[in-house]
Image: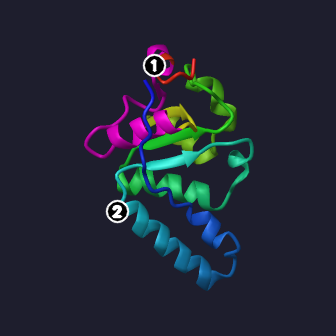
Amino acid sequence: MRSEVDFEFVNSHEKTSSVRDSSKRETLEKSLTFRLRNSKNMILIIGKTTREDTDWVPFEVRYAVDECKIPIIAAYPDFQYILKPSELSYLWPKALEKRINNSTAYVIHIPFKSQPLADAVSQFDFNNYPKGGLSFYTRDAYIEWGLL
């Protein structure tokens, strides 16, 4: 069963990726914290270089988990399905790894595909968390979505 779901995706980093001086950095930080405070969840796209970011990704993960207490939707572009999220720990930014390991982050791990994204965005928020830091969809869900 396939259906298309529309949702707005705003990549704050595309707009401000060149922010380096302190005044612009402070402005971006305020903007990011405002957006996170007004979000029901955080989508974290985890690719081959995400772990290397020592600037904004750790800040956003820390703020989302520690301050806003919102769940994280960890979306992986290079995968069709995720059935063992712990095997992807080599891709996680340190801030996420720390919070998964100390059980403060509630994370659903999914491929960066429209149906799992739409489902996770509609399902997980500050009133309905994934079951811990290593949550994932079942094999049956991926079969239903035509991804497995």
Q: Residues within 10 Å of mark 2 (few under 14, many from 20)?
A: few
- Left or right of 110? Residue 7 is left
Over which residues does the magenta segment extend?
A: 114-142
Q: Which residue is mark 2?
A: 38
Outermost residue toward the left in this view? 127
Tag nearer the camera, 2 or 1:
1
Q: Amino acid at mark 1?
A: Glu
Q: Amino acid at mark 2?
A: Asn
Residue drawn at point x = 46 percent, y = 58 percent: 63
Instruction: Label 1: state its secondary structure.
Output: helix
Count of all numbered marks drawn on residues in the image: 2
Asked if residue 128 lies in the magenta stretch, the reply is yes
x, y (%) of residue 73? 47, 41
x, y (%) of residue 76? 61, 37
x, y (%) of residue 42? 45, 50
**Quarter of the view holding residue 34:** bottom left
- Left or right of 93? Residue 32 is left
Residue 28 sits above or below residue 68 on the image? below
- Left or right of 111? Residue 127 is left
Which of the marked residues, 2 or 1, is nearer the chain's N terminus?
2
Query: How far apart in space, not on screen, are marks 2 and 1 (Cα)?
Result: 32 Å
Asked if residue 84 lies in the magenta stretch, the reply is no
x, y (%) of residue 75? 56, 39
- Quadrant housing the N terminus: top left
- Quadrant housing the C terminus: top right
Residue 33 sits above or below residue 120 on the image? below
Residue 131 sits above or below residue 138 on the image? below
Instruction: Label 2: state its secondary structure.
Output: loop
The numbered disc on residue 49 is none
Q: Which residue is mark 1?
A: 144
Residue drawn at point x = 34 percent, y = 62 percent: 38
Q: Confirm whether residue 102 shows in the render.
A: no
